[in-house]
Image: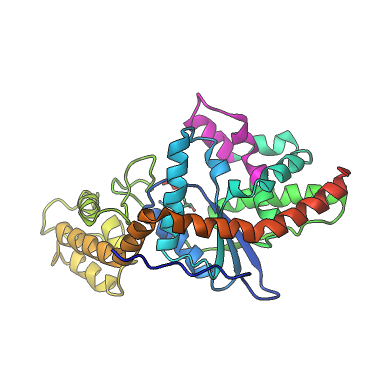
Amino acid sequence: MTVQPLAAPAAATGSPGQHRIFSGIQPSGIVHLGNDLGAIRNYVALQSHFEAIYCIVDYHALTSTHQADVLRERTRQMAAALLALGLDPDRCTLFVQSHRPEHTELAWLFATVTPVSWVERTPTYKEKAAQQPDDVNHALLTYPILQAADIAIYHADRVPVGKDQAAHLELSREILRAFNRRYGETFVEPLAVYTEAPLVLGTDGRKMSKSIGNTIDILGDPELVRRQVMSMVTDTQRIKRTDPGRPEICNVCQLQRFFGDDYEALWEGERTARTGCVDMKRLLADRITTHYAPARERYRELMAEPAQVDGVLEAGANRLRPQAAATLATVRERMGLR
Ligand code: ADP
């Protein structure tokens, strides 16, 4: 197997006057179709239009992942997956949150301007507390403060978000505003870049999610992908092969939209019962495995050559060091820490 070397990271990304975006993704292990269509595809597109900083947020992951080996492995898997799916270290900066520990210092300093009531009302805190009732650790509560620090430490002025995440960004903006009010104008309030991202449903018809176990593991073995696609729930009212299908509510038909321009013709075949659910699933499985074949191969290569991945991550963190240090120096000075 030949391993194609990754290009050396450029000294800087972006051009003068270009907006800087920041986005974090949790190292959650195997990447599924929902992650790609809902987030990673956008990351890849945005790196051409913005100075893009992408962070694998392992500090955040510690709020629910407590096994060191698991976290380490998932961090590497996420980095390899992002690179395999198209993040280009020449056009963006990819790094691991804990490799720039300045994030946590800034989060502590931001905690001193953040009223407890602001973090207590965060919907994700309430959700997480319900999901892991035996482990409602303090970091779950302060999560949004670390998020604000992640963005502000690089003075990112744009944050890609789905419409449903607008509230999170608003809290970051409030924290920065509170800091500016107390210590003088220091941070720009980042604006949302709304990204068109579909909500991808899993094999059982609920939101595709690793925690539910209803995923299509795009970088996994083609046989696994095929099994997962073949197990998908379709139109439950279509009992006999000759019953007309309803592509609007069939998840298999919906996913065809992302894998070819001919989905309307395919849908017509379903409506007229010219094709059946099994035909449609076979076609979707073929298209998904074909579409992701190069990424799957690249992912395997990268996982077999961890030094390459680690090199990209280290270069990313090093590239950001001066900016992180400069922001903290200003903040310390304004807060009277020296
Ligand atoms: P999971 O729910 O499987 O643990 P994450 O919460 O780690 O996935 O999500 C990582 C990124 O992928 C987030 O930006 C999230 O919005 C996106 N994402 C996850 N699941 C889906 C889905 N089913 N549809 C669309 N986007 C998704």
Q: Is residue 54 visible?
A: no
In percent of width and height, residue 161 lies at 56, 57
Let me know if residue 81 is in the magenta part: no
List the single residue furthest toward the top: 134
Residue 270 or residue 67, whichever sits in front? 67
Q: Residue at x 86, y 45 (%)?
A: 335
Quarter of the image where the C terminus is located? top right
At which x and y percent is residue 238?
18, 53
Q: Nearer the viewer, residue 321 or 199?
A: 321
**How many badges with numbers are in the image?**
0
Give the side of residue 119 with respect to residue 181, left or right: left
Q: Residue at x 70, y 75 (%)?
A: 16
Does any portion of residue 302 appear in the rendered image? yes
Residue 270 as seen in the image, left or right of residue 305: left
User: Quick one: quadrant of the N terminus?
Assistant: bottom left
Q: Which residues are magenta?
A: 123-146
Place of residue 102 in the rendered image (x, y in percent of width and height, measured from the top left): 69, 47
In magenta segment, residue 136: yes
The majority secondary structure of the magenta stretch comes to: helix
On screen, residue 3 versus residue 331, left or right, reads left
Q: Quadrant of residue 59?
A: top right
Residue displayed at 14% across by 50% down: 239
Most foreground residue, 316 or 229:
316
In the image, is residue 223 above or below residue 272? Answer: above
